[in-house]
Structure formats: C-alpha cells, structure tokens
Amino acid sequence: MNDRIFSWELFNKAPLVGIIRNISPDDVQKILPIYKEAGLTTIEITMNTPGAADMIRLALETEGEGLNIGAGTVCTKDDLEMALEAGAQFIVTPIINKKVIKSCVKKKVPVFPGAFTPTEIYNAWTLGATMVKIYPATSLGPEYIKDLKAPMNQLKLLPTGGVSLENMSAFLKAGANGLGVGGQLFDKKLIQEQDWEGLKAHFRQFHSKLAL
C-alpha cells in the first residue's frame, strides 16, 4: 500500500487523467518526468498492461512527487487488491462493479467507475463514486454531458474515450469535471521514435486546452 494519498490540489491544477495502456516499462519511466514538466498531474496505468502492478510501484517510487498515479481497467476485486497493493492512489473502472466501488469508498480511495446511461451513471454515483467516468464518450459527445448535468448537476463526470485536442474544450464547457485521455495523448509515433521533446510539446498542447 502507498502512504501518499490522492491530491485534489494536483488534479484541479490539470483535470486530466492520462491513460497508459500497453506502453513498455522503459518508455513509461521516460514519459513520467516529461508528463510532469508539461504541467500534467494525474496518470493511470491500466491493469491489462503487462507488468502494470510493477509499473505503478516503480512510478510511485521514482516520480510519485507531483503526480497522482492510479490504476485503470480495474474490473474485479482481484484487480483492485493488486492495484492497491502496488500503491495505486486512485482507481478507474470501465464498468460498474459494486464490490470494487464499495471497497474503494470504505478504504477512502477515490474511484472513477465507468458508466454510459443516465441510470448507470446515477447508480455509480449513489454507490459512492468520486467521479463517474462517462465511457465511451466518443459516440455521445459534449452535449451528452450538458444533458446529464441539467437534471443532475451534483454529478461529477469524467468523459473518456474519444476526447481529443479538438473537442476537450467543448467537453469542459459542457460541465465535465475532468477528462480521460489515452491514445490521443500518448502519441504512438512519438513514443516509437523516442521523440521526447516532441511528446512534451504534445502534452503541453493538452495542458493549454485545460484552461477555460
């Protein structure tokens, strides 16, 4: 378990969760300091990435200062236990698993469960979700966030899937409390070419769009 708890101060400085999936441990170690230098503060490593638990552990040891480091794609209690054992500071799920959500609430670990329909979203919220990950947000777009917030403005929403440089401002203006971004943020070509300066500039573009 990790003694360092999730920092809302850090998250609110840059309300974006970068999703690391299927990136090698060596590349992750190179990406983390660049991510911080670009002003981004919160990152999840998905549990279906080979060696995810070790990556979370190492990330916290080497780059934990100034970053929130969590686990994504947590679908089961086993995934959750492995993630928390590695020190994950927050938990993201693609689905609603009551046991996972309630366990996080009990342990006071922020949890962002994935939901799609208004009923699923409200159920996740009433179970104690810290924020509800609207997933996949691709087909629904920013207007859906606005429509959800109209009758249920107490919801905290994190649209994920299909969020890009082109539409992130629209999602935030519609009432999103944060954004989840994976492939659009972690540009495969730049990573393959080890173009770390290019990747930093790319991250900074995302950071600049967070200021409404």
Image: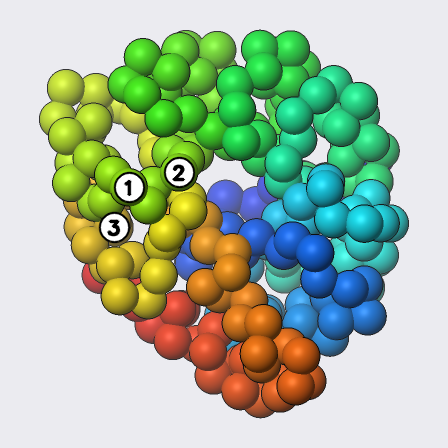
Query: Which residue type carries mark 3?
Result: Leu
Residue 147 sits in quarter:
top left
**For the point 28% across and 41% down, which residue is it?**
139
User: Label for residue 139?
Assistant: 1
3 vs 2, front mark: 2
- SS at circle 2: loop
Q: In which quarter of the image is the N terminus?
A: top right
Which of marks 2 and 3 precedes in the sequence? 2
**For the point 82% across and 31% down, which residue is it?**
82
Contact between labelled residues 2 and 1, with CB atoms less than 8 Å apart: yes
Q: How far apart are marks 3 and 1 (CA)?
A: 17 Å
Provide the residue designation for mark 3: 172
Horizontal side of 175 relative to 94 (left or right) equals left
Q: Position of residue 175 (x, y in %)?
A: 22, 41
Contact between labelled residues 1 and 3, with CB atoms less than 8 Å apart: no
The scheme the figure's colours follow is rainbow
Give neighbour class at mark 1: few <14, some 14-19, many 20+ (Cα, 10 Å). few
Q: How far apart are marks 1 and 2 (CA)?
A: 7 Å
